[in-house]
Amino acid sequence: QVQLVEGGGGLVQAGGSLRLSCAASGRTFSSYAMGWFRQVPGKEREFVAAISWSGGDTYYTGSVKGRFTISRDNAKNTVYLQMNSLKPEDTAVYYCAARSSSVVSVLEGRYDYWGQGTQVTVSS
């Protein structure tokens, strides 16, 4: 079992930055690929970014490329999402997810564990 706890969400003006964190329990964190997804009310949850177990492979959805950076610190069992140049359309609940595989995926159904989510609100 893996438990995930997100933090770092909040209210920021357009153009600002936030760094989300996701702390994981369990001794095998380093063997999990990790992802960030987001959801707005009335819409399906969408993929944002993912990182392989080693951190060597990262993937981003097109709308955040060049603005968001996913990273991980396996010694701290934590994955991060640095979000820069935020836009109002980035407003959503952001979820951290863990996949019982070293290989990344952009598919929500491939992830086995989920955090409770953290709200990010970007004002115009």
Image (cartoon, rainbow, N blue to C red):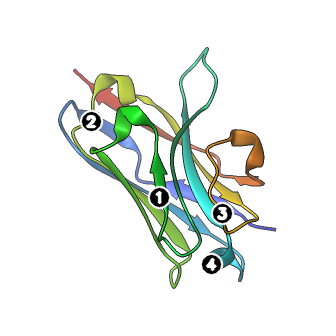
Residue picked out by circle 4: 30
* Front position among marks 1 and 4: 1
Amino acid type at circle 3 is Val
Viewer-proximal residue among 19 and 51: 51
Q: What SS does tag 3 mark? A: loop
Amino acid type at circle 2 is Leu
User: Residue at the spot x=57%, y=53% of the render?
Assistant: 35
* Front position among marks 3 and 4: 3
Mark closer to the chain start, 3 or 1: 1
Mark closer to the chain start, 2 or 4: 4
The CA span between labels 3 and 4 is: 12 Å
The residue carrying pointer 4 sits among few (fewer than 14), some (14 to 19) or many (20 or more) residues within 10 Å by Cα, namely: many
Tag on residue 103?
Answer: 3
Mark closer to the chain start, 3 or 4: 4
Amino acid type at circle 1 is Thr
Q: Residue furthest top?
A: 42
Amino acid type at circle 4 is Ser
The percent position of residue 114, horizontal first and vertical second, equals 69, 51
Mark closer to the chain start, 1 or 4: 4
* Front position among marks 2 and 4: 4
Q: Residue furthest left?
A: 15
* Front position among marks 2 and 3: 3
Residue picked out by circle 1: 58
Q: What SS does tag 1 mark? A: strand
The residue carrying pointer 2 sits among few (fewer than 14), some (14 to 19) or many (20 or more) residues within 10 Å by Cα, namely: many
Mark 2 vs 4: CB contact within 8 A: no
The CA span between labels 2 and 1 is: 20 Å
